[in-house]
Image: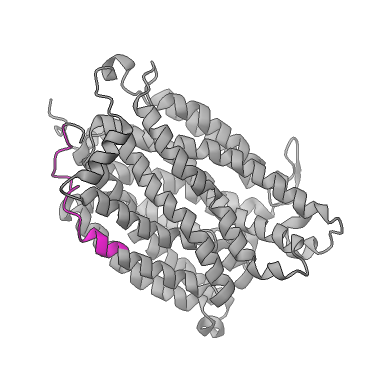
Amino acid sequence: MDDSKGGFRKYSGLTFLIGFGFFTMGIMDVLYDTYLPIFLSNILEKMFEGKGAGNFINTIVGFIMTFDNILAIFLIPIIAVWSDNTRTKIGRRMPFIVILLPLSAICFSAIPYMVPQALMKPETARLITDPSAATNALVGILLVVFGLNIFKQSVRGPVVALMPDTIPGEFRSEANGIINTMGALGAIISTLGLAKLMNLNIALPLLGNTQFRLPFPIAGFLVVLATVLLYSFVREKSSGETAREEKVPVFKSIKGIAGQADKSALWILLALFFWFLGYQGILPFIGKFCNRVLDIPAGNAALPAGFVAIAQALFAIPSGFIAHRIGRRKAIRIALIALIVILGFGAFIASPLANPLGSATRFYMLLGMMFVYGIFWITIITNSFPMLWQMATFGTIGIYTGLYYTFSQAAAISSPPLTGFLIDRIGYSGIFIFAALCMGVAFYFMGKVKKGEASEKTQPKAA
């Protein structure tokens, strides 16, 4: 049967439904990355009040923000491969999704409730006299974050692998554009909608006082709702249909990737390590930069991430179609060059040279910069994953998915402590300079890639 008959249109509806899995990640990740560093900074500043360690708070926050990535580097490949070899009546990915996503939602909703509201703002935190309040808050938030990331990072592999299970290889750039649009929609709801509720100060049944808290339980509810929709409308292949598929041992497949004469898969993995090294260095600190340096209210601190999400929602699908026409590799390399220029402009905005412009002007310039950044960043994300999947078989899609996340999460572990140290030493402009250099290295490695275009057939058998 010719899967390409009728083009991608016949798969678009299914792809949008699969995108609800990405929607859940988008709605949680942006709130997590924007406000957890602010919560942690407030707690740590109280703990180290009057102590020398306070000069390294951004470095400490950077280390804590790698916690989820350390778990991810182990959990995503393991669970992705486990789901490769799972056979149930509801599919091989869905059992993980319907259990782990709701558990993620519960833990996510609880994050702000671990922190006394007086610790949410530096000016009120100074009035706290109980020396154990900050320590107890730190322990509580770390425990909840641990639970969240056990569940969320475990489910990420099955969520991502659900799409290439069902969409033919030649259409995966377009499909990846759609599911990234759904992820961006979740991020837009978080940043332009839910984040605005951070400053709402009312009392609600069960939730109590809502100030600095309300977006998290609402996001948790939306994650549960998206899980119900995903389970209700997406049908995987039945266990009978997949039982005859080859189950390829994980170590055999990884060895095969490393031993291939053409190293395209390896070069892509190295390239994505570096572009994520740059991206993940900015992500945890952009909200704090707006809140602390530009004096932007907490409810607006997520707006830069929101503008990235808007750009992703608008350009994720077009970037997939453009790459189908000009080639995935070419599209990614053009995007990397553009990001180097954009990040250089970001370094100026964050530097003392921009102080005469005023905080408001710098903030609006940052929003515009992040929108343009999002256009080219989503071009990379939309097309890099399909390049790897193009080199996989049905039996190894989970393994390639796991390797993608192994390298991206390794970058996410390495980057925040390093960029936190750069902030402590030279200021926020350092994170943009660092990111630009990382994009340059990624551009070099992508020049070595020879495979992964939409015109190629997916490999018929495992390495």
Query: Considering only vertical position in the picture, is 345 above or below 176?
Result: below
Residue 217 visible in the snapshot: no
Q: Position of residue 262 (x, y in %)?
A: 16, 49
Q: Quadrant of residue 399?
A: top left
Which SS does the magenta portion mostly show?
Answer: loop
Q: Position of residue 169 (x, y in %)?
A: 21, 38
Q: Is residue 255 left or right of residue 214?
A: left
89 and 368: which one is in front?
A: 89
Query: Considering only vertical position in the picture, is 276 above or below 75?
Result: below
In the image, what residue occupies the spot 60% across and 65% down? 58
Query: Considering only vertical position in the picture, is 438 above or below 109?
Result: below
Q: Position of residue 201 (x, y in %)?
A: 74, 51
In the image, what residue occupies the spot 24% across and 22% down? 245
In the image, what residue occupies the spot 44% across and 64% down? 370
91 and 265: which one is in front?
A: 265
So how many labels did they put on this image?
0
Magenta segment range?
442-460
283 and 229: which one is in front?
A: 283
Q: Is residue 231 left or right of residue 387?
A: right
In the image, what residue occupies the spot 25% across and 54% down? 267
68 and 319: which one is in front?
A: 68
Residue 290 visible in the snapshot: yes
